[in-house]
Amino acid sequence: MNFNYRMIPIAFIFILVLNVANCSEKTVVGDGLIFDQAVIRPIPETNITTSGYISITNHGEPDRLVSANVDWAEACEIHSMKEEAGMMKMRKVDEGFPIASHSSLILKPGGNHLMFINLKRKIKLGDSLKVRLNFEKMGTKEIDFQVADPNSMDSQTGSESHEGHKH
Ligand SMILES: [Cu+2]
């Protein structure tokens, strides 16, 4: 048998180093992207579009939200909101939104948002719907969005009354 016993301690040290690397990686949640306040606006049954909002914090490398898609609507677009001649107008953003390192992308009412077009199902308060967010570097992240009044989300930070902690 020609087994080299000197390799054992080396292999052992290598495994230890790998474990340490794994541990430190786990302290960064979701590859460096943290999702919060993912909400979809409740709408009357007759409506066929609605909007979605989310706060994305990037603790990793610079990235970009390039697109989003869902199973429950024909299309999901990324929209910006800009004032033109005194009116707020929304526009489809084909290039998506960049998210610099250690900064946040906040989609909120009155500002940039996700637009769900030609809904295939009813959207009612309390529902939870999956949205796939596609990032240039981090790939696709499937996030649970809650159907809730988006205007009440800011004041709810850190004190959600009935749903508890959900990520
Ligand atoms: Cu829109």
Image (cartoon, rainbow, N blue to C red):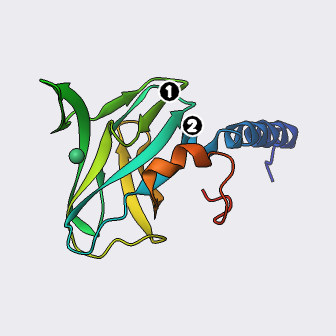
Residue 111: x percent and y percent?
A: 33, 36
- Mark 1 secondary-structure assignment: loop
Residue appearing at x 69%, y 51% in the figure: 159
| Cα–Cα span, label 1 and label 2 | 8 Å
Q: Can residue 36 be seen?
A: no
76 left or right, relative to 55: left
43 left or right, relative to 100: left
The kind of residue on which mark 1 rests is Glu
How busy is the neighbourhood of tag 1: few (under 14 within 10 Å), some, or many (20 plus)? some
Q: Can residue 81 be seen?
A: yes
Residue appearing at x 79%, y 48% in the figure: 2
The kind of residue on which mark 2 rests is Gly
State the quadrant of the N terminus.
bottom right
- Work out whether residue 79 or residue 24 is closer to the camera in this orientation and state it: 79
Q: Residues at badges 1 and 2 in contact (C-beta under 8 Å)?
A: yes
Q: Which residue is mark 2?
A: 32
> Which one is earlier in the sequence, the residue at label 1 or at label 2?
2
Q: Quadrant of residue 106?
A: top left
Say the numbered circle drawn on residue 61.
1
Residue 52: x percent and y percent?
A: 36, 52
72 left or right, relative to 162: left
Residue 57: x percent and y percent?
A: 53, 35
- Work out whether residue 123 or residue 35 is closer to the camera in this orientation and state it: 123
State the quadrant of the C terminus.
bottom right
Does the closest atom of ligand 1 sit within 8 Å of the Cβ of label 1? no
